Image (cartoon, rainbow, N blue to C red):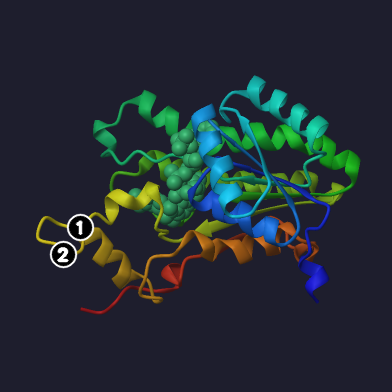
């Protein structure tokens, strides 16, 4: 049974994985046997990541690369193939959010979010697929969101990007499934990471942030997710256990999408 989930001998690239969800997913893939490769946008962040992996007893390979820059991505993938090996597993994790009411958001701010959260997964996937085809297999996991399904105030660009990422996932599955490439998404619920820290900040009187209480009431599990909650689902989608799962979005949300919310 455990062999089904083994990632021994596989090379996994997780983008933007110096900390947060990317770090937790990369650590879980390592736990299943994969060699971990990650990137971040500057050397300082990569060094921070390398230290975090080393502290966790993980030998990771870190690269400086802005995932929105196609030239940098192509160069990084070539370097990884030369220095580590062909990428068997890609996790498109790097992402940003801007919480700005839509009518106050500039077109440039909207584009920046689309660039990191949607264009970059296209750019990185495009760079790894040719070698996956040659090798005869590949796994691509796109980190989607509750906002791949739901809207909310202030996150128009993020919701547009994550909804688009859901459809990019289905399209990669459709276009490259015949080459034994599976492309699936993970849709995390509300996870306690630096990205969501402003939504959990304590009030001056020490009470919970109203958004924090709102999420607790909206989640049947009654808690925020931890980045580690995403490790098992990522191992599943990266392993042979999911070889006939393609174009699927696996929501890991403590039940948010199933629930109308706590009754008053
Ligand atoms: P995070 O703590 O902000 O981490 C995001 C990572 O992406 C950071 O390492 C960041 O690097 C990196 N990154 C951003 N732009 C980049 C670029 N152009 N090139 C390379 N790396 C870049 O976020 P997180 O909460 O762990 O989220 C990870 C992913 O999960 C994102 O796609 C996010 O949208 C998604 N997600 C998060 C939640 C949640 O509740 N936290 C829920 C659903 C989905 P820097 O630090 O250098 O900026
Ligand atoms: C927000 C949050 C969300 C989460 C996540 C939910 O402001 O609503 O940041 O977008 O990060 O993507 O799945």
Q: Quadrant of the N terminus?
A: bottom right
Q: Closest to the observer: 260 or 55?
A: 55
Seen in the image, is 157 located left or right of residue 182? left
Neighbour tally class for label 2: few under 14, some 14-19, many 20 plus, Cα within 10 Å: few
Q: Which residue is mark 1?
A: 202
Q: Who's the residue at 11% across and 55% down the image?
A: 204
Q: Closest to the observer: 242 or 94?
A: 94
Q: Who's the residue at 71% across and 44% down the image?
A: 172
Residue 163 in percent (x, y) is at: 50, 47
Residue 240 in percent (x, y) is at: 80, 63
Asked if the residues shown at circle 2 and circle 1 are in contact, with their CB atoms under 8 angstroms apart, the answer is: yes
Query: Which circle's residue, 2 or 1, is located before the other in the chain?
Result: 1
Q: Would you place residue 99 above or below residue 71 in this image? A: below
Residue 142 in percent (x, y) is at: 61, 48
Q: Secondary structure at mark 1?
A: loop
The numbered mark at residue 207 is: 2
Residue 215 in percent (x, y) is at: 31, 65
* Quarter location, residue 56: bottom right
Seen in the image, is 227 located left or right of residue 182? left
User: How many marks overall?
Assistant: 2
> Is ligand 2 less than 8 Å from the beta carbon at label 1?
no
The numbered mark at residue 4 is: none
* Quarter location, residue 25: bottom right
Q: Who's the residue at 21% across and 59% down the image?
A: 209
Q: Residue furthest left?
A: 205
* Quarter location, residue 258: bottom left
């Amino acid at each position: 049974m455990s062999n089904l989930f083994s990632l021994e001998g596989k090379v996994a690239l997780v983008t933007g994985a110096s900390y947060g969800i990317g770090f937790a997913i990369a650590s879980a893939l390592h736990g299943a046997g994969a060699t971990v490769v990650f990137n971040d946008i500057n050397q300082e962040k990569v060094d921070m990541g390398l230290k975090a992996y080393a502290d966790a007893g993980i030998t990771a390979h870190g690269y400086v690369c802005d995932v929105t820059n196609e030239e940098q991505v192509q160069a990084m993938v070539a370097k990884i193939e030369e220095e580590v090996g062909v990428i068997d597993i890609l996790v498109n994790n790097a992402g940003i959010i801007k919480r700005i009411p839509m009518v106050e958001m500039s077109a440039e701010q909207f584009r920046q979010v689309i660039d990191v959260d949607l264009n970059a997964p296209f750019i990185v996937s495009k760079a790894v697929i040719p070698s996956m085809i040659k090798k005869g297999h590949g796994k691509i996991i796109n980190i989607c969101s509750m906002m791949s399904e739901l809207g909310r105030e202030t996150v128009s660009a993020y919701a547009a990007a994550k909804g688009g990422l859901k459809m990019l996932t289905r399209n990669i599955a459709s276009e490259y499934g015949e080459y034994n490439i599976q492309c699936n998404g993970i849709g995390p619920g509300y996870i306690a990471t630096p990205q969501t820290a402003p939504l959990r900040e304590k009030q001056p009187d020490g009470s919970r942030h109203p958004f924090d209480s709102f999420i607790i009431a909206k989640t049947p599990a009654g808690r925020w997710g931890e980045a580690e909650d995403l490790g098992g689902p990522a191992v599943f989608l990266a392993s042979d256990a999911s070889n006939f799962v393609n174009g699927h979005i696996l929501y890991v949300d403590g039940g948010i999408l199933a629930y109308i919310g706590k009754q008053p």
